[in-house]
Image: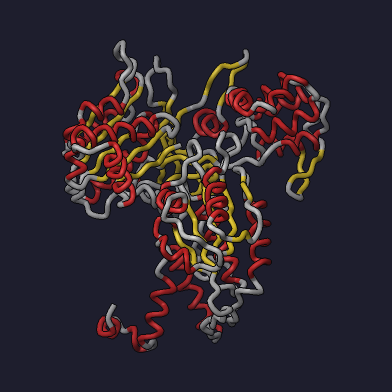
Amino acid sequence: MTSSTNQTMGITAGLNESQWTQINQATSGLNSQQLTWLSGYFAGLAQSGQTVAAPQATVTAGQSLTILYGSQTGNAKSVAEEYKAKLDGLNIPAKLVNMADYKAKQLKSETHLVIVVSTHGEGEAPDDAVEFHSFLGGKKAPKLPDLKFAVLGLGDSSYEFFCQTAKDFDLRLANAGATRLLDRVDCDVDYDAIATTWFDNVTAEVKDILTAEATQPAPIAIGSSTGGNIYTKKAPYSAYLLESQKITGRDSVKDIRHIEISLEDSGIEYRPGDALGVWFTNDLQLVDQLLTLLAVDGDSSVEFSGEDYTVKELLIEKLELTQSYPTFAKAYAEFANNAELTALLEDKAALREFLAERQIIDIVRQYPAKVTAQQFIDTLRGLTPRLYSIASSQAEVEDEVHLTVALVDFEAHGESHQGGASSFLSTRLNEGGEVKVFVESNDNFRLPEDGNTPVIMIGPGTGIAPFRAFMQQREADEAEGKNWLFFGNPNYTQDFLYQTEWQRFVKDGVVDKVTLAFSRDQEQKIYVQHRMLEQGAELYQWLEDGAHLYVCGDANHMAKDVQDALVKIAIEHGGKTEEQAEQYINDLRRAKRYQKDVY
């Protein structure tokens, strides 16, 4: 913005050009809620007569700290942002950079580097981190004898390649000659306390080297000036359920629900591509069965995270019961003293297959153990919210948020089982019932800024959710770009999710093409990747015309099959070698024209 523009707006009446530049730099990364709070904060300072001294950073010559994050769903980003805020509060200067925006050549000039990175799928780097991860593992990776670094990994121990991306970064930096500030830490899904301790240890290592002196105004509580709220995983919004409607047919092999939640009066904003974090409670019947098997009194008192609870309320509200994981099996095996379970712990592949088919109660039922209430509580990890791709645009639904949820409901080992969050939303939460939610922003899954850009959407099953939001938004924006949906599910008559809506989108000219793959409507199963190959020439032309391609759904099979199909299409219809085709797909991803929301 030029100074003449500033004068036109009346800005320079109180600020000089340098001050205006500083404000632009300081606020460039803030969202609308943060800017609103900041305006109230400065208004409070003006009323109290306080002044804000510009921070004067004095850093040991040539020393700096950079925090790099690679995030798929937003967790690693949030953790990195929290650490940056802590450093700011301690006057320790640091840069916070998304790996996707980091220039690899800068690495040689870094002195202190903190990496926070997640892992998804089968040990794969998140989209943010793919290029930087590949660079450090390639021939062009530099020697880094002057770099000190630390790596924090986020992952899920239920998966075989737990925190593999963090392990890769840690090893590759060490092999480049860099020195660890402290050992890498691999966090499971319940990561808050461990991450906080690790960051405190990193800070202790760097605070005497990286110093800054600044006069800081007394903190003002967020929202105290404006009354606004910022809802997060740690401070969710208490919303209420408007509707839970089954949208698959009576004879469908799937039970998929359309969920509508009210955000009225919350001020919460979200964008197409974002996810909704949902906190849930465990099924009371499941908890009672578990207490009976353990012969534990539900009213007995236990300690968890420094607070006292009854066993029953803790199992209902705070602990993970519907997902099994290796750390539980290992801890519980010490009490069970069962040779079969102990042997399983020695075979990682067999253990994961065993856990995939069982919930916590199945293991307790199969291997009874004499265990106290506190001992059992100590084997379990904390409950974590589930993330669901948002299936609506606020341009259409305003103060609501919609989800597409598949109810996990299956028989195994002679017992019925349901998923924790999916059953909470689908069957246990009554209309009007409270559900605690927060928005998880996903900048890796965004519509193109130019409404004229063509869009290809590949979303079988519940993967269709964000594309419903995409089309609601493009319709509201009157975007001119073409839209093509690939959708698949078992049966046309039972499982065509939001069929009438998609037909209307086509009728009204919002969607140009819908390609369907119903796997069980013929003898030979047909999936979305098969339809892509059939339509390969046209699909490739769309990409050549600048289309953005999006994939949502299963990470372990569908997403990989789709990627393989894209490579084959680039070979057959682009005249490329396999290596060139793979580079073509990588270039699409690097340009943010190939984005995935997979789970």
Is the residue 224 above or below the residue 276 in the image? below
Q: In screen coordinates, is 542 left or right of 212?
A: left
Is the residue 279 above or below the residue 129 in the image? above
Is the residue 358 above or below the residue 35 in the image? above
Quadrant in the picture for residue 106: bottom left
**Residue 554 appearing in the image:** yes
Residue 530: x %, y % from top left: 28, 25
Q: Nearer the viewer, residue 427 or 440?
A: 440
Residue 389: x %, y % from top left: 42, 41
Colour convention of the picture:
secondary structure
Q: Nearer the viewer, residue 122 or 486?
A: 122
Q: Residue at x 37, y 40 (%)?
A: 391
Q: Nearer the viewer, residue 363 or 143?
A: 143
Residue 360: x %, y % from top left: 67, 28
**Residue 359 appearing in the image:** no
Q: Residue at x 30, y 29 (%)?
A: 487
Quadrant in the picture for residue 7: bottom left
Q: Residue at x 71, y 39 (%)?
A: 314
Residue 354: x %, y % from top left: 62, 23
Q: In screen coordinates, is 3 left or right of 66?
A: left
Q: Nearer the viewer, residue 577 or 88?
A: 577
Q: Quadrant of the image for the N terminus?
A: bottom left
Q: In screen coordinates, is 326 left or right of 67?
A: right
Quadrant in the picture for residue 83: bottom right
Give the mark count. 0
Q: In screen coordinates, is 407 left or right of 500?
A: right
Q: Residue at x 58, y 79 (%)?
A: 60
